[in-house]
Amino acid sequence: MNCLIVDDNKMARTAMKQLASHVEQLHVLGECASAIEAYNLLQKEKIDLLLLDIEMPGMSGIELTRNLGKKAPVIIFTTVKKDYAVEAFELNVADYLIKPVSPARFIQAIQRAREICEGQSQDLQVSDNEFVFIRDNGVLKRVKIDEILFLEAMGDYVKLHTPQKYYAIHTTLKAVEEKLPPGRFMRVHRSYIVALDKIEAIEDGTIVILKNAVPVADAYRSVLNSRLNLL
């Protein structure tokens, strides 16, 4: 992974570079002393991971993350305070490190970031409308489309539910919807797609699938009714 260190404190940047030097396949391409400098560099360079301080003059790390939006690389916040933890995780960052950072904790955060990067490069593939391939902990696993019960949007992830377990995929619900056979699946809510043949009951605006309750939004109700074989 190509990494950029962003921190207004030179000693903190040096400490991060030292930690990064001990992790294989983690390459520090540069360092920035401000969020604005980092923003400009990210417009030109391909960066996979930001080690990003929060409290910086001019623009904070949180403000930089918001400004980057969907174009942001994977981000690990590094800070001396715990105060921003809730706000940080609402931005779906990979991790939140409190300085000084121990080598073990740093490696744990990098591993989490690496899994997200791998997920971004290959989230879900469809093969012959019978199987999907899902990256699970760095391994591509084959899942029968017939086993998919429903899909649920969770921030920057989609949870794919099967009778046995669910898989968390780093993608969007829209991207998954475009890959699934449209005759077998339908979006019933801005956060849910269901397998039509797995619906067991519909009651009070809620679909029941294998004891799971899935909401149906009013905007999708008439279309859903037309797709079902109502007697």
Image (spheres, rainbow, N blue to C red):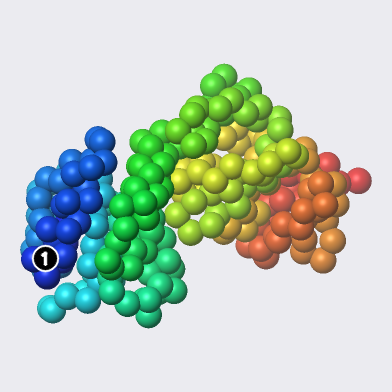
Above or below 183: residue 42: below
| Image location (x, y in percent) of residue 19 | 22, 51
Point 25% across, 45% down: residue: 48
Classify residue 56 by image quadrant: bottom left
Provide the secondary structure element on which disc 1 rests. Answer: helix
Callout 1: 10 Å neighbours few (<14), some, many (20+)?
Answer: few
Q: 202 left or right of 137? A: right
Residue situated furthest right in the rendering: 231
| Image location (x, y in percent) of residue 57 | 13, 79
| Image location (x, y in percent) of residue 86 | 44, 74
Classify residue 68 by image quadrant: bottom left
Above or below 137: residue 11: below
Q: 4 left or right of 140? A: left
Q: Amino acid at mark 1?
A: Met
| Image location (x, y in percent) of residue 66 | 29, 67
Q: Which residue is mark 1?
A: 11
In front of the other: 96 or 190: 96
Point 41% across, 33% down: residue: 122
